[in-house]
Amino acid sequence: MSVQLMNSLTWKEIADLDRENTFCVIPISSLEQHGYHLPVGADDFILEYSLKSLEKIHLDSDRNILILPPIKYGNSFEHLSFPGTITLKTKTIMSIIEDIVESLSINGFKNIICLNSHGGNTAVLHAIAQDFRYKYDVKILNIDLWASNFFEDADEFIKTNFVTDVHAGEIETSLLMYTNPDLVKEKACSCEELANIVNFNEFDYSWLSKDVSKCGVIGDATDSCIETGELIANYIDLKIEKIFNSILKKF
Ligand SMILES: [Zn+2]
């Protein structure tokens, strides 16, 4: 049982793995605007932190985890009117992931986990999981940091309502204050710029962040602090360990 980075192994070491009992992790993030105060790589820094958590977990199983190199772009059309946002088209993401899945499946891997740190990737990852399961006879699981209940229990130590903390708000800002302090600008946004709540409850539509936000934030980062960031980082460590162990036990 081990957690290893695929790009650090030789092909022989990979061939010697019990491949049917190895879970290959495809990490994916984004490069997109995160308000005035966070870098465009925010989702990727959060993914990096999550992968470091994953490398350190205590595995409760005799199965292996193999982490593939991350895909550092995602589906970011909603932020494209803000410079510094680079988006992949939906069909491009499908093609990249299909090529990775096909390569893994040719060499006998049967279990794939997409670890995603950007909400814009969620719909496409869910759609392809079932397609590729049929086509390549692999199981694909999605762990989604945003469009899931991943941060639900973090509600108790953030001041913002969890449901309205959509983009570059208190969770992301506090976490980056802790993990990448040199990259967080001091000035967040004014109240006028924060009149930006998106209501997803009764219907969905093709919203763009410029429809709801001048500064690019959807949520409110003004209560962010490094102490909350440390709590969120510890929370990610525990949650990653719990989710991976429960997947390895169940599948
Ligand atoms: Zn983000």
Image (cartoon, helix red, strand yellow):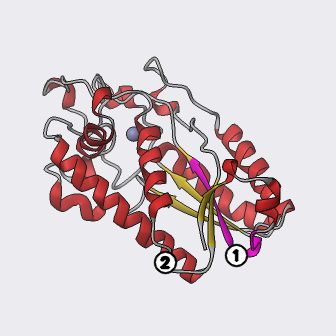
Q: List the residue tagged with mark 1.
A: 21
Residue 184 locus on image (x, y percent):
28, 28
Name the residue located 70 percent from the left edge and 75 percent from the top edge: 21
Q: Quadrant of the C terminus?
A: bottom right
Query: Going by the image, does 72 lie left or right of 237?
Result: right
The verdict on residue 154 being magenta is: no
The verdict on residue 18 being magenta is: yes
Mark 2 and mark 1: span between their CA atoms?
Answer: 14 Å
Q: Nearer the viewer, residue 94 or 153?
A: 153
Q: Quadrant of the N terminus?
A: bottom right
Query: Going by the image, does 45 lie left or right of 99?
Result: left
Residue 133 locus on image (x, y percent):
74, 67
Three-letter code, disc 2 = Ser
Name the residue located 16 percent from the left edge and 41 percent from the top edge: 225
Q: What's the magenta region?
A: 17-27
Is residue 118 at least partly visible in the picture? no
Q: List the residue tagged with mark 2.
A: 246
Residue 250 locus on image (x, y percent):
56, 82
Q: Nearer the viewer, residue 51 or 197?
A: 51
Instruction: Give residue 176's quadrant in the image.
Output: top left
Which element is circle 2 on?
A: helix
Which element is circle 1 on?
A: helix
Q: Nearer the viewer, residue 205 or 225?
A: 225
Name the residue located 57 percent from the left edge and 76 percent from the top edge: 248
Indicate which disc, 2 or 1, sits on the residue closer to the N terminus. 1
Three-letter code, disc 1 = Asn
